[in-house]
Image: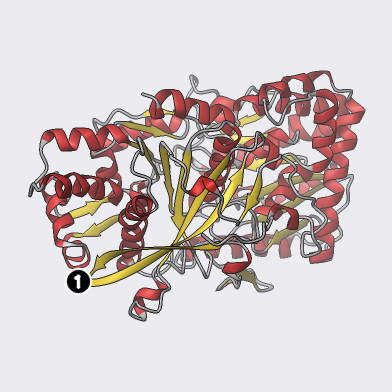
């Protein structure tokens, strides 16, 4: 295999550019595009995800799911978990968001040079799509953990000269195209991914981790492998049981519409006839193919991504036993440079043992505040250069950044304009928003425009900015640089969320609806504040008006007076964010749970 010079992507994070003021994460986890022995090593776990987010310049992610996948792989590398990851190569990325002065979003393809980051492998496999042979290659990247252990990532790509013109673009656009395009992509990921692993010699894999239902067709391919090796025409109960033992499924979606479904006719036209027959035999093609149901049917261990999400999923998905493994973040990646400096001083060893973050309870107030102020200056410097709004470092700064979706209610704060104006007169406030709407989600795009309208109406009283093209680098600036992280989803639609975890690691408290991870992370007045009562009080504000009222009340009567008049109390809460939520909501803890409850079970 031809060797290539090592190329470090993380070293570029601090290079000059739109967000060049934020330095690279220095977690010890490196990215290397040079094929090493790891690609041929015996691995026990294959981790499949439609998207993987590692660094800004590698645009193979759309948001939370992909960033979580990247953090998961990093944690596995740190903990020496014998894993190999499989995803798709998205040559056009998700999309680049462009916002005009009224907030109207247009989507542009992302331009990047694959060979600058990844190395092509010589292996080729194929799948049959609509009766045509579609060839697939893999590109390679490795993640090196803090102990030097390497995890390979395979990026599958159908852009080969031997394929028909339409088939060459099947892997190009993340979550793009129509239902047919999505099914073809999921064939490449699930079926093609298993075949590529076998072609590379990975025949001793013990577990296949399906990160959301997009890769569920890998289960059908595992059944087909057993049929091909035995010469049988249909699977036995033993075949299904053995496949089930090898599969782990993580569901991320508490909304029925979020689970991929494909019509029966499309499935029979697009998939290989033998695989269609297997889907019929295992009763997963009754009217339509539901990828979540397929993964549930053939996975021994199934989990949601927070305790609340597991409860919601059990009600949504019927009798399937669904456990909870709450998401986390890779602490070495998401701690800002100023926070890293104080962590090194007061919690040595935190990169390798996140429980050392508990030591942050003893940090002097002024040292934490100084680090936070440095992170805030970095953020405001970028925002002011990009928008010329003139945000001020001493003004209370609220951050709201995530995928733009109606249920997340990003415009909730503007439901009572007179109330927010009154608050700002007593306590200066400035707001920073960011987030992309899916190009086909008209409601979400109109939501962004409503925030722009509020900005224009309040421009003489309140400073509001909406940053375009939210990405990993921008996220690292925002979660560290704001004073409060706001989260207002309509419960119970938040599966987990990880942006608030990233903020907590940097000493930024959350004001959030008690949904997703915040049910576990909120200690009222200690790690942040809840919108609604605790999980036992069950006074969750499903009604939008009540939710808005509680946001205003918490800001006016609790948070803003504390920030401006009792700064030491506010810094105490910042310390507890790091010391209490930092250790638990980490991918190191999360990965250890996967190993003990599913990989080794």
Which residue was labeled with disc 1? 131
Which quadrant would residue 501 be assigned to in this image?
A: top right
Q: Is residue 129 visible?
A: yes
Q: Which of 86 and 403 is in front in this view?
A: 86
Question: Please, is residue 152 above or below residue 532 in the view?
Answer: below
Q: Which of 4 and 359 is in front in this view?
A: 4
Which residue is farthest left? 233
Rendered location of residue 456, percent (x, y):
72, 65
- The image shows residue 530 at horizontal and vertical percentages of 61, 30
**Residue at figure coordinates x 74%, y 51% from the top left:** 431
Query: Which quadrant: the C terminus?
Result: top left
Q: In this view, does 565 lie to the left or right of 550?
A: right
**Mark 1 neighbour density, 10 Å: few (under 14) some (14–19) many (20 or more):** few
Of residue 139 and residue 281, the one placed in the foreground of this image is 139
Which residue is at a point 77% across and 29% down the rendered structure image?
A: 574
- Colour scheme of the rendered structure: secondary structure
Q: Is residue 136 left or right of residue 588?
A: left
Note whether 566 is above or below 272 in the view shown: above
Q: In this image, 224 relative to 468: left or right?
A: left
Task: Please state which of residues 193 and 431 is positioned toward the viewer in this rendering.
Answer: 193
- Compared with 198, 185 (above or below) is below
Q: In this view, does 142 lie to the left or right of 270?
A: right
Q: What's the residue at 41%, 64% (across, down)?
A: 137
Residue plotted at (25% across, 43% down)? 293
Does the image show residue 409?
no
Q: How many marks?
A: 1
Residue 490, position as x, y percentages in the image: 49, 42
Q: Where is residue 559 in the image (x, y as percent from the top left)?
A: 75, 32
User: At numbered mark 1, what does the secondary structure look like: helix, strand or loop?
Assistant: loop
From this viewpoint, which residue is outermost toward the front?
1
């Amino acid at each position: 295999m031809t060797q290539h010079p090592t190329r470090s992507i993380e070293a570029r994070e601090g290079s000059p550019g739109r967000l060049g003021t934020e330095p690279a994460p220095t977690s010890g986890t490196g990215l290397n595009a040079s094929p090493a022995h790891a690609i041929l090593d015996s691995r026990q776990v294959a981790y499949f995800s439609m998207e993987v987010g590692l660094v800004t310049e590698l645009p193979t992610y759309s948001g939370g799911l992909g960033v979580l996948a990247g953090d998961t792989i990093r944690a596995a590398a740190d903990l020496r978990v014998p894993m190999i990851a499989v995803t798709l190569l998205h040559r056009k990325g998700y999309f680049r968001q462009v916002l005009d002065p009224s907030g109207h979003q247009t989507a542009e393809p992302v331009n990047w040079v694959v060979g600058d980051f990844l190395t092509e492998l010589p292996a080729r496999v194929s799948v049959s799509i609509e009766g045509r042979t579609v060839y697939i290659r893999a590109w390679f990247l490795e993640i090196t953990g803090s102990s030097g252990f390497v995890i390979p990532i395979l990026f599958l790509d159908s852009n080969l000269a031997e394929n028909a013109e339409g088939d060459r673009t099947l892997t190009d656009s993340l979550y793009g195209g129509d239902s047919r395009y999505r099914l073809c992509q999921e064939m490449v990921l699930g079926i093609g991914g298993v075949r590529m692993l076998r072609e590379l010699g990975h025949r001793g894999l013990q577990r296949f981790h399906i990160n959301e239902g997009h890769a569920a067709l890998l289960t059908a391919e595992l059944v087909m492998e057993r049929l091909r090796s035995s010469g049988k025409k249909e699977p036995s109960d033993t075949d299904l049981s053995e496949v089930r033992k090898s599969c782990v499924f993580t569901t991320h979606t508490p909304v029925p519409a979020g689970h991929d479904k494909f019509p029966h006719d499309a499935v029979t036209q697009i998939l290989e006839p033998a695989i269609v027959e297997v889907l019929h035999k295992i009763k997963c093609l009754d009217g339509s193919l539901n990828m979540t149901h397929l993964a549930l049917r053939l996975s021994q261990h199934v989990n949601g991504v927070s305790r609340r999400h597991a409860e919601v999923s059990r009600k949504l998905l019927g009798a399937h036993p669904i456990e909870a493994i709450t998401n986390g973040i890779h602490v070495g990646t998401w701690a800002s440079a100023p926070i890293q400096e104080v962590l090194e001083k007061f919690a040595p060893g935190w990169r390798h043992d996140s429980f050392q973050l508990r030591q942050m309870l003893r940090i002097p107030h002024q040292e934490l505040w100084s680090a936070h102020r440095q992170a805030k200056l970095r953020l405001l410097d970028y925002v002011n250069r990009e928008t010329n709004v003139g945000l001020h470092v001493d003004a209370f700064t609220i951050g709201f950044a995530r995928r733009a979706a109606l249920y997340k209610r990003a415009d909730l704060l503007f439901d009572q304009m007179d109330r927010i104006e009154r608050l700002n007169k007593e306590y200066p406030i400035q707001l920073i928003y960011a987030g992309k709407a899916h190009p086909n989600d008209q409601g979400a795009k109109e939501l962004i425009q409503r925030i722009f309208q509020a900005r224009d109406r309040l421009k003489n009283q309140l400073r509001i900015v909406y940053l375009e093209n939210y990405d990993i680098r921008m996220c690292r600036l925002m979660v560290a640089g704001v004073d409060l992280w706001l989260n207002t989803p309509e419960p119970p639609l938040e599966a987990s969320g990880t942006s608030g975890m990233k903020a907590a690691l940097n000493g930024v408290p959350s004001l959030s609806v008690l949904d997703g991870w915040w049910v576990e992370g909120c200690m009222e007045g200690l790690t942040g504040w809840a919108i609604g009562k605790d999980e036992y009080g069950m006074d969750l504000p499903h009604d939008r008006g009540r939710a808005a009222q509680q946001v205003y009340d918490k800001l006016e009567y609790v948070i803003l007076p504390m920030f401006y008049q009792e700064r030491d109390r506010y810094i105490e809460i910042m310390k507890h964010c790091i010391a209490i939520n930092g250790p638990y909501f980490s991918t190191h803890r999360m990965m250890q749970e996967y190993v003990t409850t599913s990989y080794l079970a």
